[in-house]
Amino acid sequence: MAFPLYAMVVVAFTPKEAIFDGGSHLWPSAWTTQNFRNLFDQFPVWTWFGNSLVVAGLTTLLSVSVNLAAGFALAKLRFRGRTVVFVLVLSTLMVPAQAIMIPQFKVVSALGLFGLFWAVILPSASTALGVFLARQFMLSIPDELLEAAKMDGCTPFGTFVRVVLPLCKPLIAVMTLLAFMSQWNDFLWPLITLRVPDLYTLPVSLRFLQGQYDADYGGLMAMALMSCLPLVVLFVVLQRYFVAGFARSGIK
């Protein structure tokens, strides 16, 4: 898995004319940043980068909030049909995303969101995997803590905010990374719903570097390298919570 990443870095810093000169390119013959300079000179890269940050950031915030609340309800609140609701949520994991794109597109269009960032953000505001991870993690929280909070006068919402959430840092880290990574790398749905190039995200903007008969591989690899950096930074920041979050959520 490391070699494709290494090859991406090498090609990104290799002069365009030297990429297909017949060499193996395990190391650039001459390091250059020309591919990056060409990108910034010819395309609104910072605009696309900012669009990706806005879309991925808002989606992550909504997704983590909704999934945590749903997971708490399914794990700790007692109501009729709770198991049925959980099974229905899990069953959506068996439905391919492509199978619901046409109905989803019709809903987005009917709401007047087509062509806006919200058309990309709202459909990802909750995920079955996120609800599952939240529920499984919160099942490990002792009920005695919730009962003690209730005796102290906490409402269910107060218990959720003051007792449960502080214990869910590993879970929040996992859900944040998964939600951000999924939305940051999403290509098909933003391609369908975002009509104006100034609203494109980084994965969608990569198609500008591919012509009908050729492609700027140096520019493609440079753009791909830049798109990887936020994910690497986010993982480094959250890695100490990552393993603990998965382990306590029942993923072995």
Image (cartoon, rainbow, N blue to C red):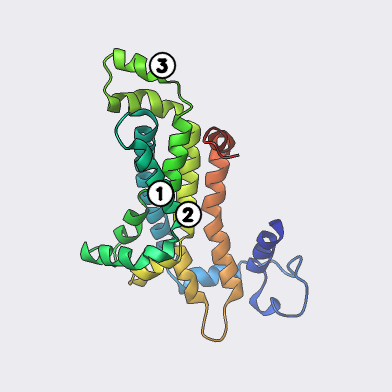
Residue that numbered label 2 is attached to = 182
Q: Residues within 10 Å of mark 1 (few under 14, many from 20)?
A: some
Task: Give the quadrant of residue 119.
Answer: bottom left
Identified by mark 3, the residue type is: Glu
Residue that numbered label 3 is attached to = 144
Q: Nearer the viewer, residue 37 or 79?
A: 79
Q: Is residue 243 left or right of residue 73?
A: right
Quadrant showing the C terminus: top right
Q: Which mark is residue 84?
A: none
Q: CA distance from mark 3 to mark 1?
A: 29 Å
Residue that numbered label 1 is attached to = 127
Q: Earlier in the sequence, mark 2 or mark 1?
A: 1
Q: Where is 167 relative to 1, above or below?
A: above
| Disc 2 to disc 3: CB gap under 8 Å | no
Can residue 200 be seen here?
no
Residue 56 percent location from the top left of the image: 41, 53
Q: Which secondary structure lies at badge 1?
A: loop
What is the count of numbered marks? 3
Q: Earlier in the sequence, mark 2 or mark 3?
A: 3
| Disc 2 to disc 1: CB gap under 8 Å | yes
